[in-house]
Image (cartoon, grey):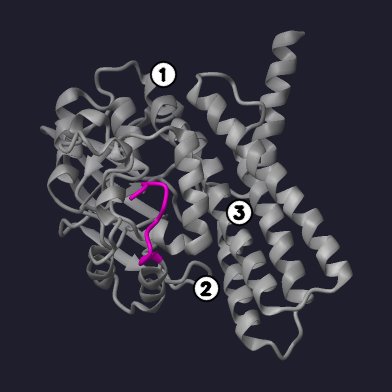
Amino acid sequence: MDFLTPGSDAQDIADQLRQIVSPTQTRIVMREWSQSAAFNRLGLPAKYVLQQNIQNYQDISLAARYRLYEKVGFISPILMFSAPGPGMAAFAVSGLGTEQQQDAFFSRFQETLGWSCFAMTEPEQGSDAGAMETRASPVRNGYLISGRKMFIGNGMIADTGVVFARTAPGPLGINAFIFNPQVAEISRYALELNGLKGTNLAHIEFNDVFIPEENMLGRHLKPTERFAKSAIATFDALRPCVGALALGVARRALHEWQSHLQLTVSQSAWLSQTERRWLAVYHHALRSCQQTDDKQPPDSHPGMVKTSCVILADEIISWLIHDTPAGNMPLLNKLWQAFRDVKAFEYTEGTRQIHRLNQGFSRRQRMSTCL
């Protein structure tokens, strides 16, 4: 089976995930998915893949990951948010971890299905790392971490993860640690969701959680190298992929709309124009991923790539809802679900206001350098 095809049972699995009432059910449902083992290896460095003949299950390129995310979004983005695997934490561990830390982290995904989380966002500060309040206080042989993290994907069921905490004032005082989310000193609360219902987003509280010294990532690197190789690299890599999920949801909405209605001449004309716009945005984001793979500066800021995808998806689905007869409830129910899901992407990997500010700041920096 092609890795970039989510599997014939994917829709049924996604529908079950939408109905779960307890986070632990996610594990049960996902174990039944034919592609769970593949997603468990997504982001796993090649040397940790035991079945070397399954090449497509190795550390795929960002462009391939982008195409995969769009296909999953077409079926249901719930699949991606609930899938096992090293996830976002893999970027931090690969970029910052020693060989021993990488072995300890990635080896668990060789043996069985596992879930990870990436704990950076905070209730009051969002993803503004400069204002981070979670503290890592040095003690004998390690650190005690105290603070709160919010909107943590798979936070309710994760077996491992990476948490960011402040060890000293200023931007160079932020460090990343591998941690076990299931220890007694950690409290986890499932968040009530409207969009992306079925996703295990969590609010996590750290109450003097002891982290061994050897679990601090990047100790062998200069402080200036640590943050750029972990959080920033992770976000920039995956933001276009979040946009791909939104485009997949929009493509599915267009598919459902065409399947349920007899289109008028004007509707057909709008559809042709919209499909061209969708393809333009899709390929613009794909080009950004390919440039990153080729170690070239992308033409567009990754945050703005994600923003463009989400804005178009939002616009498409809103128009479809307004152009659907009020009595066609089966179609409207599907479109409203897509609408709620796409709205949730606005807050995934940063809102559009944040990305516009980042783009403007980066632009001013480049202009100052040129001057």
The amino acid beneath tag 3 is: Leu
**Measured from the top left, where is residue 132 in percent x and y?**
44, 42
CA distance for labels 1 and 2 = 39 Å
Identity, as a three-letter code, of the amino acid under mark 1: Thr
Residue 124 appearing in the image? no
User: In the picture, residue 290 is in which quadrant?
Assistant: top right
- Location of mark 1 (residue): 224
Up-down relation of residue 227 to residue 72 (above or below): above
Please identify the dominant SS of the magenta region: loop
Say whether marks 1 and 2 touch (CB < 8 Å). Answer: no
Q: Is residue 274 magenta?
A: no
Residue 20 appears in view: yes
- Tell me the kind of residue under disc 2: Asn
Do residues under tags 2 and 3 come within 8 Å of each other at their CB atoms? no
Question: What's the magenta region?
Answer: 1-10
Local secondary structure at mark 1: helix
In three-dimensional space, the C-alpha distance between marks 3 and 1, rounded to whole angstroms, equals: 36 Å
Residue bearing mark 2 = 194
From the image, state whether disc 1 or disc 2 is nearer to you.
2
Q: Nearer the viewer, residue 42 or 340?
A: 42
**SS at badge 2:** loop
Residue 77 place in picture, x, y as percent: 47, 60
Which residue: 33% across, 56% down?
83
Residue 141, position in %: x, y? Answer: 11, 32
Q: Residues within 10 Å of mark 3 (few under 14, many from 20)?
A: many
Mark with earlier residue (1, 2):
2
Q: Label 3 belongs to which residue? A: 247
